[in-house]
Image (spheres, coloured by chain):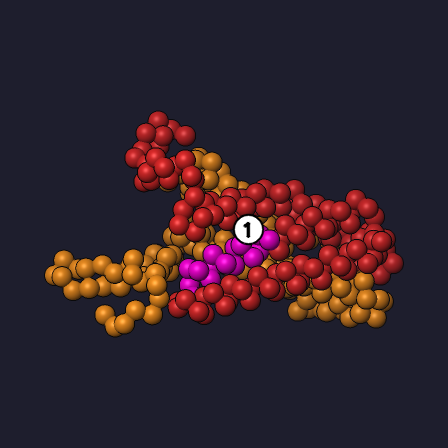
Amino acid sequence: MSSMKDAREATMVGRRTDGTRVSRPLSPHLQVYDMTRITSAMSIMHRATGVAWSVGLLVLAWWLLAAAAGPKAFAAVQWFLSSFLGMLMLFGMTAVAWYHTLAGIRHLVWDAGHGFDLPTTYRTGRAVLIGTGVLTVLTWLIVIIAWG
Amino acid sequence: MSEKQTTAIRMESALGRVRGLGSAKQGTHHWWMQRVTSMALLPLTLWFVLSVATLAGKSHEATLAWIAHPLNATLLLASIGLSFHHAAAGLQVVIEDYVRGEMPRMFSILAVKAACWLFGLLSAIAVLKIAL
């Protein structure tokens, strides 16, 4: 092992059975888990959608700022949001928002100590995925009705 | 909680349990606040997504009138504060997990916190300017 670059490495030094030292990976090491499994795939998706939503908050800030700034700035943000790219982004954000919300509820239930057994985990996982699809379509039905 | 979980061995001393705080002296505050904000954001997100969906294609005046309504302005401000708090807390954990090196990690966390504060304030000021 080379010199330590990170204070946390002090607690991550282990030894193999033959005695050679090994630096344990940081959590949650993506390269270790099988990402084709619904459990691990949905776990990292929760993180990814959280990060995506944080970026989406910038769009919200832009929208509010433009509305406060005046008609010209508001027309610009509305032009972008109603463009193909803008609509695609908003549709993606809707799916991201519902996924992170539903998966978040699943996490809160876990935090309360329920639903850890594998059949329940798979069942709630599928429910989150189906719920995301249903709520995203429903939201956009409202958008289309409101727009029309 | 099942019987099995409650009788598990505690990985802390009795004194540690009384004090309830770890080496960072914050205990589970960060983790708990992430849960508190997430619970508060559940109804707020539902309200926000459905409200914004009905605002699609509305004029500038109609949008301003919606934001300026005291109830909408209040819920918007609550959503903004909680969302940026939740985002900052979540992004911090992501950075702590993936960014190596004490300095790059610390500075990326500080940068994310600064951005969340500034964009949160910017959004709140915009709502207040419209509503007041």
In x, y percent, where is residue A92?
60, 60
In x, y percent, where is residue A71?
85, 67
Q: B131 or A95, which lies in front? A: B131
Which residue is pictured at 39% across the width and 68% down the height?
B101
In x, y percent, where is residue A72?
83, 70
Q: A37 left or right of A11? A: right
Which residue is pictured at 59% across the width and 59% down the height?
A54
Which residue is pictured at 12% across the width and 61% down the height?
A18
Q: In the figure, what tint was chain A given?
A: orange
Q: A137 or A101, which lies in front? A: A101
In x, y percent, where is residue B43?
65, 42
Q: Magenta part of the protein: which range? A: B85-99
Other residues around mark 1 within 10 Å, as few (<14) / some (14–19) / many (≥20): many
Which residue is pictured at 36% across the width and 30% down the height?
B6
Residue B88 painted magenta: yes
Query: Does residue B43 appear in the picture of this structure?
Result: yes
Q: B75 left or right of A40? A: right
Q: Which residue is mark 1?
A: A100
The N terminus of chain A, quarter of image: bottom left
Q: In the figure, what tint was chain B given?
A: red
Kind of residue sitting beneath label 1? His
